[in-house]
Image: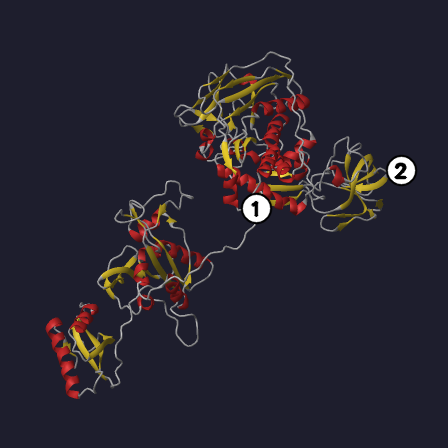
Amino acid sequence: MKFSESWLRSFVNPAVSGNDFSHLLTMAGLEVEEEETVAPAFDGVIVAEVLEVKKHPDADRLNVCRVNIGREEPQQIVCGAPNVATGLKVPCALPGATLPGNFQIKIAKVRGIESSGMLCSAKELGIAEDASGLLILPADAPVGQDIRSHLDLDDRLLTLKLTPNRADCLSLTGIAREVAALTDTPACYPQVATTPVTIDNRRDIVLDAPEACPLYCGRVIAGVNAKAATPDWMKRRLERSGIRSISALVDITNYVMLELGQPLHAFDNTKLEGAIHARLASTGEKILLLNEQTLSLQDDVLLIADDKRPVAMAGIMGGEDSGITLETTEMFLEAAFFAPKAIAGRARRYGFGSDASHRFERGVDFGSTRVALERACQLILDICGGQAGPLCEAQATLPARPPVRLRRSRVAKVLGVNFTAEQIETIFSRLGLGFVRNDDDFLVTPPTYRFDIEIEEDLIEEIARLHGYDAIPSPAPRARLAMLPQTEDARPLFRVRQILADRGFQEVVNFAFVEDTWENDFAANTAPIRLANPIASQMSVMRSTLIGGLVANVITNLKRKQNRVRLFETGRCFFRDALGQPVKGFRQPWKIAGLAYGSALPEQWASPTRAVDFYDIKGEVESLLAPVVARYEKTIHPALHPGRSARVLVNDQEVGILGELHPQWVQKYDLPLAPVVFELDLDALTRARLPKYAEVSKQPAAFRDLAIVIDQKLELQALIDGLLANRPTIVQDIRLFDIFTGKGIEQGKKSLAFRIVMQDTQRTLQDTEVDAAIQQLITYLHQAFSAQLRV
């Protein structure tokens, strides 16, 4: 809601100005989103009258003007504007004036003729972009008056960011009502008199959909002059509210909408046939709107129609065929109340909106419908002339305003401030709320313009707003604190996050609702959990994996020239599963996922640059799980490369996956390199293994290297598992340190080299014991895997 502060102060003028005034509105819930001045700073410009215009003797495009500036002697000013003419009132910058851009006006000679000032255009004053000629002022503008005062250029423009429940503040009257209550300043609203009826022209009104349109008022006005000029004061207020002037009749309806909050519509009465109907559309019924858009309507769209055809989308926009033009001489003026549910979403469905729909779908004051019609008729007769017919009206059941009970004890409990009943009574009186008091209880009847007051907490909010949120004390909480136990078998989430941060990862937080395509691509989820009312079309489903969000983060970073990215996220994923879950029908486990992209190490002189790979991210997962040792098995996952991915198992239970992003998605999402990702169940990381005592041997360890040749298709994990299960008691560790294929190795075979670590806690091992242990391992490998010693 954009408006002129000067216009608002014509209703209520508190002793608060500038930033303090904006702060007052914001703290009361009417957030001031933007402030701007009408004109930049300048001085020394007055209203002047052109007395005489002569051609410059040495310049075809210049004129020499005699100008009355309100002093005894007229001034001579050279002017090049094409529209300068005798008798015009225009702005004149006198010698010594400073225009926007720090442009100084001095007495100067222009082609040999002395010029004592400058006649100004709107662009030169910084109040418009038009530079086609001088700014023409009204004929009654007082000569010599400062132009800033005459045009009210010290005015400020405020834009409020209103919440949907405060539709009552979508008008100057509503904002003035709020300011008067906040500052306890009397307000003065326009006096609206009953329009004198001088003709008997009327039109019947039929409410065919009374639930959607319970009140409809209209009046025929004949003999109007649609070509009449809109007064400058009205045009100025409209323009400063962001509405351009069109014609006097249209401007008046817009002006009343801004002033009182009631949208109006004017029909050309000669284009209407029979009675006016407020009815629902038939499926497929068509209407041509004022925006030149032809719509095929659904059966839940409310229409205004005559006996033959629809003439307007009720509460949204009028029809082109029945609209007024500059040739209109007889009009039918409409003011109605449409139920918010009947208007909400209809304009957006067809891809447009209007000031009227913005107000009606939030709720318009049905107690002022007739007042707004009378106000508009009054202005039309004053500006465009004409004769008014009787007010035609049809009314059904209007919305009930049930009283709301407020308990003083409840106010104290919610706000922490012990208001007296008299203080609450004063606040309600300032707000214009009707109430009945019974000791410390109040029964409040919401006015017709307050659709947001329905429960006791709404009234408590009103008390808090007027009292001032910043005046509510905020004492420090006082409570007994106890150290919570932290068992050794649990690892806090903070520690898990800190491990990744210490290893160069940065944490991200993404939305839990994601694109439908992400679920299909990264989880092969063709039936995701859909949101009933998504905040955006690209956020329509709940995620079942964190990988999609991390890939999107990489894309964002690449667009900003960040070529090495390491990210992680913790969050819930969502699945259809009702077993033992607090939310019926859904499972919401916590997951942790990480992604590495680009070089394995930051750019440096000591190490060659190489891309991050599967084993880098496997090392990160091992550091997260430590001291638990996981097993890794080859797997197929829709998000991952089929030959460079694995599932992670702890105690034979799958706890996650890791691997390189599938080449198909690398290509689809236009990634120069393939990221490597992991995703784990957070429970597996927050469970810690209790420490167990084990004696540290003081005896020296014995080391042997064992190189074997096995079938190339044999998986290493199976080999390691078998060796560890069948090792002699003195074997403490078995580590792979080399893999080789090529010269000297049979086709289809591979060589694996293991380092065997042997040690006893009580004595030094003998060579015979070491050799026997190695022979036992060799025998097992030969029998279980047909392994041969490499010679």
Q: Is 321 situated left or right of 85 in this image? A: left
Residue tagged 1:
469
Q: Residues within 10 Å of mark 1 (few under 14, many from 20)?
A: some
Screen quadrant of the N terminus: top right
Percent position of residue 462, x then y: 55, 39
- Say which amino acid is labelled 2: Glu
Viewer-side residue, 239 vs 431: 431
Image quadrant assignment for residue 50:
top right
Residue tagged 2:
72
Q: Earlier in the sequence, mark 2 or mark 1?
A: 2
Image quadrant assignment for residue 658:
bottom left
- In the rendered view, would you say 644 is above or below 516? below
Q: Is 379 situated left or right of 108 in this image? A: left
Viewer-side residue, 472 vs 68: 472
Colouring scheme, one of rainbow, by chain, secondary structure, one colour: secondary structure
Q: Is residue 353 visible?
A: no
- Which residue corresponds to the image point at 21% horizontal and 83% vertical from the top-left? 760
